[in-house]
Amino acid sequence: MKTMKMKKIKIVAVLLSAVCMLGTSGCSKKEAASGEHAQVSIKFPTASASGALYAVGAAITNLWTTKISFVNAASQASNGGIDNLNQVADGESQVSIAISSNCYQSFKGTDSFSGFANEKLRVIAGLYFNPNQVVATEKSGINSIADVKGKHFAVAAAGSSVEGECKNHFTAAGLSYPQDIRAEYIAFGDAADMLQNGTLDGAWIMSGTPAAAVSQACSSGSHLVNIDDSIIETLKKEYPWYASYTIPAQTYPGQTADIQTSAIKMVMFTTTDLDEETVYQLTKTFWEGIEELGEAQRNLKGLKAEDAVKDIANLPLHDGAAKYYKEINVM
């Protein structure tokens, strides 16, 4: 009887030990076999399920899950950049993508993030540029940013990052925003329809090229508008995230010349809550698989690791990402 009781005590002890181990492992990590890295689960919010960013996130997370033994990553739909930054700051998600301007504002606690600075935010990689694209009808007479004064112009959704671009650029051009224009707060697709039927003078579209809404507008006679050097230089002095960008000729129907504009780089980010080894492996695997990713998603095609640390608004790199960039001599 004594032996049986001892066996029962041992069994209970083992079960209690197992329960304790399960109870102490977080929802984002579970213990791996001895000598291996603990398993890491990564939630990766992107944007709406119909958008290009959702597909980009799906391609990246599939690569990580396939290539890194201790990582299980999954993309999910979200409300876009500001939502992504809030989710990562709150610990709901671990990695995401947003434009560098929004990342800077989150890190510093300004604009939409006023009072909620996320000082733990860290960059994994600067990715591709998101250029500003100003489209206008021929009859509008809009051939420069200053020409938008007094015109019926689409500035995207109120409070959106795109409307913020309108405000920054029009102010740099000497206009009072929104007083100096007849602002229309509508989505890109609706703006393209209105340009096509002539009920709108122009629209601000921020997207990778070629953008469907810009193609639609240009196919019906609208044209792209250059953004002058003086405006871009004024913006760069005040905002560390802007870069000059050229939309090559023939990108859109009827576009016979290069168009100069401004752009903001898309940034893949995390926080210091993810450990150095995990982020090192995420960074290394991303860049070693960039050709494969580029074949799956055109926005990732042609990206180079040496550009990953440029035009990122002077935001800090994660130690794991920095370790990789130092290894390949791009820092």
Image: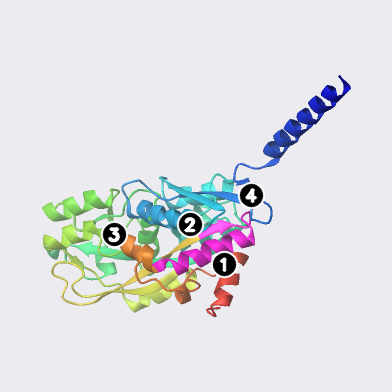
> Residue 225 location, x and y as percent?
24, 69
Report the side of 185 relative to 14 (left or right): left
Toward the viewer: 145 or 53?
A: 53
Q: Of callouts 4 and 2, which one flags the residue occurring earlier in the amino acid sequence?
A: 4
Q: Secondary structure at mark 2?
A: helix
Nearer the observer, disc 3 or disc 4?
4
Answer with mark 1 or mark 4, whichever residue precedes in sequence.
4
* Marks 1,2: beta carbons within 8 A: no
Is there a contact, CB below 8 Å, between mark 3 and mark 4? no
Residue kind at label 1, given as amino acid type = Ala
Placement of the C terminus among the 4 image quadrants? bottom right
Q: Would residue 130 be seen by someone viewing this image from the given angle?
A: no
Measured Cα–Cα span from mark 1 to mark 4: 23 Å
Q: Nearer the viewer, mark 1 or mark 2?
A: 2
What residue did someone put label 4 on?
A: 32
The circle on residue 204 is: 3
Q: Report whether residue 93 is seen.
A: yes
Q: Quadrant of residue 329?
A: bottom right
What predominant SS class does the magenta segment belong to? Answer: helix
Amino acid on which the number 3 mark rests in the picture:
Trp
Q: Which mark is residue 64?
A: 2
- Disc 4 crowd, CA 10 A, few/some/many (<14, 14-19, 20+): few
Q: Residue at x 88, y 22 (%)?
A: 2
